[in-house]
Structure formats: structure tokens, C-alpha cells
Image (spheres, rainbow, N blue to C red):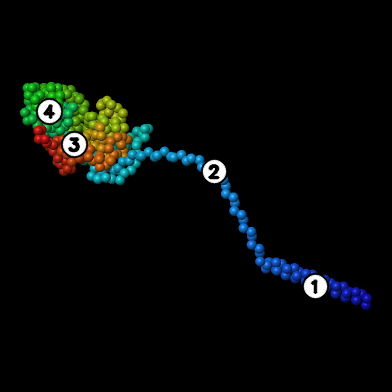
Amino acid sequence: MKKAASSKKAASSKSAASKATASKATASKAASASKSAAPKKPAAPKKPAAPKKATKAAPVKKAPAAKKVTIAPKKATARLKGTAPARTVVHPPGDESRTALVRRARRINRELAEVFPYAHPELDFENPFQLVVATVLSAQTTDLRVNQTTPSLFAKYPTPEDLAAANPEEVEEILRPCGFFRAKTKSVIGLSKALAEDFGGEVPGRLEDLVKLPGVGRKTAFVVLGNAFGRPGITVDTHFQRLVRRWRWTAETDPDKIEAAIGALFPKSDWTDLSHHVIWHGRRICHARKPACGACPIAPLCPAYGEGETDPEKAKKLLKYEKGGFPGQRLKPPQAYLDAGGTPAPPLGAG
């Protein structure tokens, strides 16, 4: 009985202890809940940071003004009639490879062929004899002056035999407008005698024979071979020499070396037309003293772009012959030239 009573007391004490623990947990939860429900105090505003002391800024160096970039029209053919958009010119490098040079040179020739599809020898002639005489007379004067002079000469002396037997003083009088008329009279009478005596009155079609005639050098010989006999040759006159150096095709100054250097850049079949294209460009656009760069069809390919007038409108005023709306050099030009807008040159004394 005592044992049962003691066990009952222990059980009741355990129950009371557990109830007390539970009540404490409940109270603790209630306290924490009341704390969370209580409003939080607003945080005190932060004081603004004191401004830093101003430091003197280092002076900014002005950048140098950018250099003006020379620009050239994109393509040339249309520029002769109007103004085309512009682009930066790509100059060939100083170490341009042989392959790059050949490609650039041939492209220039193709561009010029588009601009001057009617290019031809600018000396009036009807046969090889008239051409060789006219070419000899063209030294140190213009083709126009020769064309204005030769009609009287050939009317009076139509064959080599006639000119070989002519009175030098009468020939001098006819040739006076060409300049150096005494030396030229001696040359044309001398070559006429050589043709009559050594070649049966016919102009030979070989280079080695032509250069034996008085007053005939390689340049004259190639003019005759290319335009009277259809045999390719490069005519290295003053215009040709100036332009091929300006385009950096060669640095040579001797005509024979120039001929060899340029001939190596082109197939032989192109030589005669190439000569016409270069010479025509030199006479009409790429002048010695003031090139019309702003109206140039090959400006993007030219290392010397900018040496002349680059303003398109001002450059157009520098164009000569048919490009500038003026008469050509021949009194009797080919029909293709007339169809292209060219006009014949006036005869001697016509103004």
C-alpha cells in the first residue's frame, strides 16, 4: 500500500513539472511575438560626407589638327561631264611588287581606252610617205601646226621623187611655220632622196631600215610602223615620258630604256594603242605644269594625284581639245573622233 501511494505521488509530480514547462514555452512564444509586433524605431539619417578639397586639373593639351586627306573621284569616265562622289586615293607603296605594278599599269590603260576609244595618230596623212614626213616635221612643234603646213607641201611635192628634187629654199618657205625650218627642210629632202634611191620610192616597213633615213629615230619609226603598217611599237614622246614616270611605271629617263621598261609591262599587241592612250591623256588632261587632277579618269590609280587642280569644276576648265570643247589637231580627223564630239582643226591662217 505504501508503495502504491508513493508511485502515485511521483506520477503527479511529473505531470505538474511537464505542465510548468509547457506554460513557460507558451509564455516565451508570446513574448517573442509581442516583440516582433512592436514598431521598429526609424534609423537616424546619415550625415552627408564632407566635400573633398578641389584639386587643380592638369591643363589638357590640344591635339594637333588633322591633316587634310587628298581625295579623288571614284571613277573617271563620268567625271568629265559632271562631278562624281569622292574617295580617298590609295597611293601605290614604294615597295610595289612587280605583279602589282603590271596590274595597275594595265588597269590604267583599260581606263584610258574607255575615255579615248577614238584615239588615233594626230597627224594628217594619206600614205606612209606623208606620215614619215609629217612625223619628222612634228619635232619641237605641235601636230596642229604640222597639219596646217603639210597640205601645201604635199600638194606641191606628192612623192619622194618630187621632194628629193625640190629647191630647198622653196621648201624652207613652206615649212617656216613649223619652226627649225632649215634643219627640217634638210631632213625631209634627205629622207626623200634615200627613199627614191635605196627603197624604190617606197617607205620600208622594217625598223632597221627606217632608222637609216635622215631625221628618223626610233620614235618616228614606231609611229610609222604602228600607224601605217599595223606593226606594234611604243612611241616615247615627251608626253609619254612624263606620264609613265608620273605614274611610277619606270624611273628611267632615256627614251630607249623607257621603251624597254614599258614594253615589258604590256603584251606587244597593246603597244600602239597604249601609246595613243598615254599621249592623248597627256595632251588633254595630265598636262606638264597644271594637270587637271579633279577631272582625271585614273585619279584613284595615280601616285601623283594632287600635283594639279583637284577641284572638279576648276579642273574641267583645264581640259583641252574635245574634252574642253575645243577643236582637235587634225584638219581631217577620223569619223570616230567626229562622232565623239570632236571638231576638225582650222586650216593655217583661218584663226
Name which residue lies at 31% across and 44% down.
86
Q: Residues within 10 Å of mark 3 (few under 14, many from 20)?
A: some
Name which residue lies at 87% across and 73% down.
10
| Nearer to me, 239 or 275 | 239
The spot of residue 304 in percent (x, y) is 31, 35
Place residue 332 in its image quadrant: top left
Q: Is residue 107 above or below residue 255?
A: below
- Mark 1 lies on a secondary structure that is helix
**Identity of the amino acid at label 2?**
Thr
Residue indicated by mark 3 = 120
Q: Quadrant of the C terminus?
A: top left
| Nearer to me, 106 or 194 | 106
Residue indicated by mark 2 = 55
Residue indicated by mark 4 = 177
Horizontal side of residue 3 vs 53, given as left or right:
right
- Mark 3 lies on a secondary structure that is loop
